């Protein structure tokens, strides 16, 4: 079982090109499943049937796991068994007929324009780290990149003249995303001043570097956001994905087409993008008052 698991992880990294974050989650979730199988005396993957899987789900519920965590673990198991089918190690999947728990769909949290402005102005541009931080914050907000995509960027993927970035997203799918002039200016300043100082005598094609001249990690980006959000007094937990949510929300609030936002985000399915179609109350009121004929008439009479 351990050998099969190791081959599967290698497959995820080498052929599927999934992010380190996904590999870590799948590893944790599958090891938890294997531990359960061991406790139940199940010695082979071929012995696992749908009843064993259902027993495992009941076990997770008994541990008090929330629906989202159970759904994630089931997704990891389902992916693993798809691999076993692909390699012809088994003939049927025990999770093929097992449904994931229905999740309560929560609206994504996002920042207001004013909060974004505070965040972008927070870095100290007199230091190489501050120039780097301004550039990465501008880029996260301007392009809607995933943090895994941001930290994996190399110099050759960025074109400052066209303000385009060639991104390798989920499933090794390539897409072109864009940035505005403020992000391009911040990136240009970082590349000409801050990055050479951080790089020192080292050689690297990584776009964003830490103080040792090495590629920035996802964990460091999270800490950068935490520090600046605290510094400017944003009273909510700010994470890199929140800037992606903010990117999509502000685009749609500004009148962008849903399919264009889907393309920029790199979503395979439109349903993933539709969650961003919520609008702020102020935007909804503005659109209503400007578009509805009776609202306009009532407004004129009351004036």
Image (cartoon, helix red, strand yellow):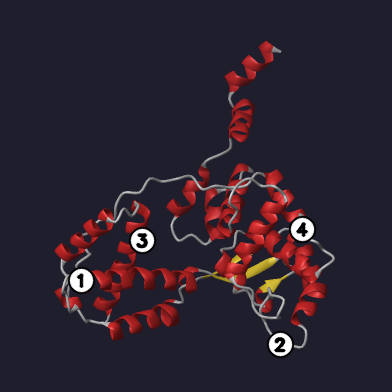
The residue carrying pointer 4 sits among few (fewer than 14), some (14 to 19) or many (20 or more) residues within 10 Å by Cα, namely few
First in sequence, mark 3 or 2: give its number: 3
Q: Quadrant of residue 185?
A: bottom right
Q: Are marks 2 and 1 in contact (CB under 8 Å)?
A: no
Q: Is residue 198 visible?
A: yes
Q: Nearer the viewer, residue 252 or 198?
A: 198
Q: Residue at x 31, y 80 (%)?
A: 5
Measure the C-alpha gap from mark 3 to mark 2: 39 Å
Mark carried by residue 261: none
Residue 143, horizontal then vertical, whole percent: 64, 60
Measure the C-alpha gap from mark 4 to mark 2: 28 Å
Q: Residue at x 59, y 22 (%)?
A: 293
Q: Of the residues tagged 1 and 4, which is closer to the observer?
A: 1
Q: Quadrant of residue 302?
A: top right
Q: Of the residues tagged 1 and 3, which is closer to the observer?
A: 1
Q: Are marks 4 and 2 in contact (CB under 8 Å)?
A: no
Measure the C-alpha gap from mark 2 to mark 1: 50 Å
Q: Quadrant of the C terminus?
A: top right
First in sequence, mark 1 or 4: give its number: 1
User: In this image, 99 relative to 303: left or right?
Assistant: left
Q: Residue at x 60, y 72 (%)?
A: 217
Q: Are marks 3 and 2 in contact (CB under 8 Å)?
A: no
Question: For mark 4, what is the residue?
Answer: 182
Residue 213, horizontal then vertical, whole percent: 71, 81
Question: For mark 2, what is the residue?
Answer: 203
Mark carried by residue 72: 3
Question: For mark 1, what is the residue?
Answer: 39
The residue carrying pointer 2 sits among few (fewer than 14), some (14 to 19) or many (20 or more) residues within 10 Å by Cα, namely few
Disc 1, SS? helix
The residue carrying pointer 1 sits among few (fewer than 14), some (14 to 19) or many (20 or more) residues within 10 Å by Cα, namely few
Residue 249, horizontal then vertical, whole percent: 58, 47
């Amino acid at each position: 079982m351990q050998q099969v698991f190791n081959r599967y992880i290698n497959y995820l990294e080498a052929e599927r090109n999934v992010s380190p974050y996904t590999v870590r989650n799948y590893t944790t979730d599958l090891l938890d499943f294997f531990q359960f199988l061991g406790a139940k005396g199940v010695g082979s993957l071929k012995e696992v049937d749908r009843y064993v899987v259902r027993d495992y789900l009941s076990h997770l519920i008994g541990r008090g796991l929330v629906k989202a965590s159970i759904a994630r673990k089931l997704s990891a198991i389902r992916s693993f068994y798809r691999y076993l089918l692909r390699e012809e190690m088994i003939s049927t999947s025990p999770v093929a007929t097992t449904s994931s728990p229905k999740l309560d769909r929560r609206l994504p949290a996002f920042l207001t324009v004013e909060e974004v402005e505070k965040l972008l102005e927070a870095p100290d541009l007199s230091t190489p780290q501050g120039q780097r931080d301004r550039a990465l914050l501008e880029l996260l907000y301007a392009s809607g990149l995933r943090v895994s995509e941001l930290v994996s960027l190399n110099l050759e993927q960025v074109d400052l003249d066209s303000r385009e970035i060639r991104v390798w997203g989920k499933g090794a799918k390539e897409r072109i995303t864009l940035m505005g002039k403020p992000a391009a200016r911040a990136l240009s300043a970082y590349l000409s001043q801050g990055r050479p100082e951080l790089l020192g005598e080292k050689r690297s094609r990584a776009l964003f570097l830490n103080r040792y001249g090495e590629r920035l990690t996802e964990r460091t980006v999270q800490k950068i956001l935490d520090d600046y959000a605290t510094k400017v007094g944003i009273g909510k937990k700010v994470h890199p994905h929140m800037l992606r949510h903010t990117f999509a929300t502000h685009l749609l609030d500004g009148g962008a087409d849903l399919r264009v936002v889907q393309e920029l985000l790199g979503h395979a399915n439109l349903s993933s993008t539709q969650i961003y179609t919520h609008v702020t109350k102020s935007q909804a009121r503005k659109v209503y008052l400007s578009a509805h004929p009776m609202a306009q008439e009532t407004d004129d009479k009351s004036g």
